[in-house]
Amino acid sequence: MADENFCKDYLVLKPEEASPLDCIRILYSSALQKRNFFNAPEEATVRGFRHRWIIFVSVVMQKLFLWLKGPVAKIGSLLELWLNYPSCNGGYCTLFLNLLTGRLVRPDNSSPNFRSIVGNLDTRVELDGSIKNGDNRYIPSLAMMASKLSYENKAFVQNVIRDKWQMKFMEFYNFWNDYEEMDTAQAIMFEDTSTGNNLIVVAFRGTGPFDTNAWRTDVDISWYEFPGIGKIHGGFLKALGLQKNEGWPEKIQLNSNQKLFAYYTIREHLKTLIHDNKNAKFILTGHSLGGALAILFVAILTMHGEEMLLDRLEGVYTFGQPRVGNKQFGDYMKEKLREFKVKYLRYVYCNDIVPRLPYDDKTFLFKHFGACLYFNSCYKGQVSFDFLY
């Protein structure tokens, strides 16, 4: 199979190729290698009903999300449009008058005033004025707001960074997924010049409330195992820029006609910026799926021996991040983070289901690693290295 070109041990599920009968067969047949939706080495075996049950749940959930893709996206689009009518028409009273007089202004989803579902749920855009540069809460707080801002459109992002935060907007990215053949990842990049030596912030967008492609990635249990590193979640790797038939070559040809891949595009941009400013540092952040992409970006940097970038990486701050690999991968990353003195803080809210995905059981063994900043329902936090949801 094509995946063997760069990885000898792997499990890749292709739910779009699974028929209803295939889904039923998962529950009683261990010979899944003969099915098109199940991609694994020939010698791989599916042991026990629990193993088959988890594969069954993952495939069925992904098929459900595929089926719901169009309707859910339409509902999300209509809901966002409805939520933005009041602000585009000067408030509810003016909205009612405009409706009566035929002067109703239709929201433009590319305008600097159009908010996403996330932006409507939490309308804050200003940074906390009580947390100043130099406070040890400043960078995590900035990372949190950047993660939230990444859900918005380009014009909104530019407006907030330049006018509200008084920082330098750099880029708004849409990244290609070589396997799904569409853009499935987004990120923003800006520079905080108030830190003296300049701090570059890269924030990956997370799982959108009505983006079933991102939901699929969260419930996918596909993985690739890399010698000396461990097993890593396949869906997250694909969103980050995994190359078909090649895996993670150190370099790919980048030109104006080629699709943008997250890891390679951001890596080259960071190299250029840091070359121009020898004292600049950068952080990586993201919420949900975005958090997974942030920490895996570091993993691929270590695989490629990008010591110059790793030395300039101040920290990784994730919010509601899902599990990204097994215990071996976690041990590998903890060692690399210590070696390059990179801070890694993973913020978790008690009722968030995403940090509990993918499954953590004796069959698949996806594990968190590093410091967990856990917040209960009263928003009281505690730091733990053992409380690894």
Image: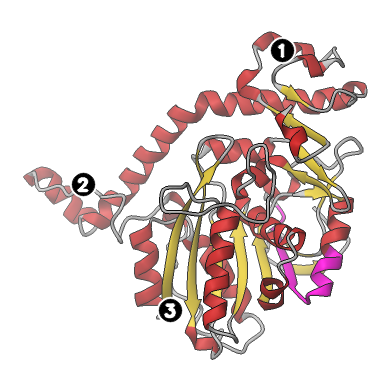
| Residue 155, position as x, y percentages in the image | 33, 61
Tell me the amino acid under the disc marked 3.
Met
Give the colour scheme of this rendering. Answer: secondary structure
Counting other residues with Cα less than 10 Å from the Cα at mark 1, is it few (<14), some (14-19), or many (20 or more)?
some
| Residue 166, position as x, y percentages in the image | 40, 81
Q: Mark 2 points at which residue?
A: 106
**Mark 1 to mark 2: distance in Å?**
46 Å
Residue ID at (90%, 24%): 43
Q: Mark 3 points at which residue?
A: 167
* Dot 2: element: loop
Tell me the amino acid under the disc marked 2.
Arg
Q: Quadrant of residue 224?
A: top right
- Is residue 169 in the magenta section? no
Work out whether residue 291 or residue 340 is closer to the camera in this orientation and state it. 340
387 on left or right of 375 = right
Looking at marks 1 and 3 on the same chain, the residue that comes earlier in the sequence is marked by 1
Q: Nearer the viewer, mark 1 or mark 2?
A: 1
Counting other residues with Cα less than 10 Å from the Cα at mark 3, is it few (<14), some (14-19), or many (20 or more)?
some
Residue ID at (20%, 55%): 89
Looking at marks 2 and 3 on the same chain, the residue that comes earlier in the sequence is marked by 2
Q: Name the residue under label 1.
A: 22
Numbered range of the magenta stretch: 334-350
Image quadrant where one finds the N terminus: top right
**Mark 1 to mark 3: distance in Å?**
53 Å
Work out whether residue 350 or residue 222 is closer to the camera in this orientation and state it. 222
Question: Does the rendering let one see residue 384?
Answer: no
Q: In which quarter of the image is residue 10?
A: top right
**Mark 2 to mark 3: distance in Å?**
30 Å
